């Protein structure tokens, strides 16, 4: 049984999903002999079967989805092979494949990215019929996929995200010379709920500024800017576009707290990145964030002013903050990339035990 990794959509500048792909597949390549469907990003060790055109990458615009669909359907595989994709992009009609559906948020927010909604609503259910299993990143997403598509729960496996604490780490000196501010990451998407944070500004505006990162120019940003202006927050809120890794790391390290008050999540990587930088987290009280963060975050009930007031006030209680950060270290020890690859290996072997034949003799067990 041959294991083929589908990396066709991976671009040269990986997003959060790209980081997941690179870490999971590079770890897998240390344990199994792999064949690869290569994209334009960094490749693990393995034999390249196909090289995808750059025009189908997930960072190549809306038409890339159509080009990707046509190209994937042109590929042909040995029936005795299992094609694993760490993304939700499959390879046409091959019956031996596994895809990874990280979340189904766009199914509930169709206006945010209509082409993604179309994929989740119409194309994904057809693709699932050719899947031997579906992988996802949390138990919350596992249940969401089951409810949305009726895909058998026993064939949905959790392979979580990870965090590299050698990349994200504290720098107390950065915070010391900064005016206190709260940080939000992911401001381009309405479900990240920046509007509610602005509407609850009475609880934070006198003590903190707000920086909203990853909020590119466009109609949604203009909506947020108008709201900030209407609320008299023009000098208290700063919107930033896409940031380099170093720029984002600096903000994590300098922030008084990360606000992650999403209405829906499949996992939630920024809170882990913040905790790794020694930064407290205020998170919305939703199932995915409860599942991942446990007692490491202060939770806020969305739409509840009293809950917001209590959450912001908790930042001045050093005992509570330190307790949350200690719990954060326990959470970070759980979500390592090595643990993610262990879960991936276990899931693959559960789906296809014959993959034992392609295990590297010197790989980790």
Image (cartoon, helix red, strand yellow):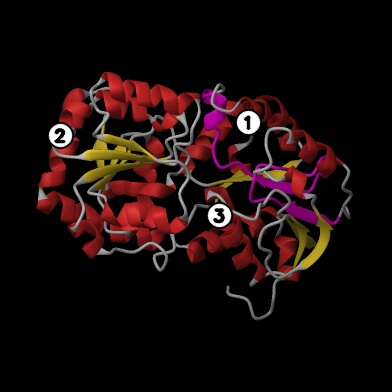
The vertical placement of 111 against 151, above or below, is above
Q: Looking at this rendering, what residue extends furthest in the front direction? A: 235
Q: Is residue 346 visible?
A: no
The residue identified by callout 3 is 20
| Residue drawn at (36%, 30%) of the image | 194
217 vs 177, left or right, is right
The residue under the point 41% across, 33% down is 192
Q: Main secondary structure of the magenta part?
A: loop
How busy is the neighbourhood of tag 2: few (under 14 within 10 Å), some, or many (20 plus)? some
**Relative to 125, residue 348 above or below:** below
User: Residue 340, position in %: x, y?
Assistant: 52, 59
Q: Is residue 262 magenta?
A: no
Distance, label 2 to label 1, CA atoms, is 37 Å
- Residue bearing the label numbered 2: 310
Please report the bounds of the magenta region as a residue range.
Answer: 80-109
Residue sitting at x 19%, y 57%: 177
Q: CA distance from mark 1 to mark 3?
A: 19 Å
Q: Which comes sooner in the sequence, label 1 or label 3? A: 3
Say what secondary structure mark 1 lies in.
helix
Q: Is residue 11 above or below residue 286?
A: below
Q: Earlier in the sequence, mark 2 or mark 1?
A: 1
Q: Rate crowding at label 3 as few (under 14), some (14 to 19) or many (20 or more) other CA atoms within 10 Å.
A: many
Tell me: 318 left or right of 118: left
Instruction: Find disc 1 in the rendering and name its residue.
Output: 116
CB contact under 8 Å: marks 2 and 3 = no
């Amino acid at each position: 049984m041959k294991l083929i990794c589908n990396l066709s959509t991976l671009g040269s500048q990986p997003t959060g999903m790209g980081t997941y792909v690179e870490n999971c597949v590079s770890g897998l390549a240390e344990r199994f002999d792999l064949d690869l469907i290569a994209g334009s990003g960094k490749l693990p060790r393995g034999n390249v079967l196909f090289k995808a055109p750059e025009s189908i990458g997930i960072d190549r615009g809306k038409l890339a989805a159509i080009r990707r669909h046509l190209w994937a359907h042109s590929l042909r595989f040995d029936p005795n092979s299992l094609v694993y994709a760490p993304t939700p992009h499959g390879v046409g009609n091959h019956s031996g494949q596994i895809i990874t559906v990280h979340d189904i948020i766009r199914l509930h927010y169709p206006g945010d990215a209509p082409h993604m909604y179309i994929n989740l609503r119409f194309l994904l259910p057809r693709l699932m019929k050719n899947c031997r299993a579906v992988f996802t990143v949390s138990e919350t997403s596992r249940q969401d996929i089951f409810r949305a598509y009726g895909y058998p729960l026993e064939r949905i496996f959790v392979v979580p995200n990870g965090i590299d604490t050698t990349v994200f780490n504290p720098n107390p000196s950065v915070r010391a010379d900064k005016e206190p501010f709260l940080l939000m990451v992911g401001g381009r998407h309405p479900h990240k709920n920046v509007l509610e944070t602005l509407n609850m500004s009475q609880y934070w505006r006198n003590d903190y500024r707000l920086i909203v990162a990853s909020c590119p120019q466009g109609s949604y940003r203009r909506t947020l800017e108008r709201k900030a202006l209407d609320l008299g927050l023009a000098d208290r809120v700063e919107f930033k576009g896409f940031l380099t890794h170093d720029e984002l790391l600096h903000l994590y390290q300098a922030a008084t707290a990360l606000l992650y008050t999403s209405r829906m999540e499949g996992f939630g990587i920024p809170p882990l990145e913040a905790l790794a930088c020694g930064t407290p987290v205020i998170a919305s009280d939703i199932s995915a964030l409860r599942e991942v963060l446990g007692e490491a975050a202060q939770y806020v009930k969305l739409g509840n002013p009293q809950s917001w007031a209590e959450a912001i006030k908790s930042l001045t209680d050093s005992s509570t903050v330190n307790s949350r950060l200690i719990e954060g270290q326990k959470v970070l020890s759980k979500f390592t990339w090595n643990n993610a690859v262990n879960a991936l290996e276990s899931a693959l072997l559960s789906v296809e035990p014959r993959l034992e034949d392609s295990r590297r003799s010197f790989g980790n067990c």
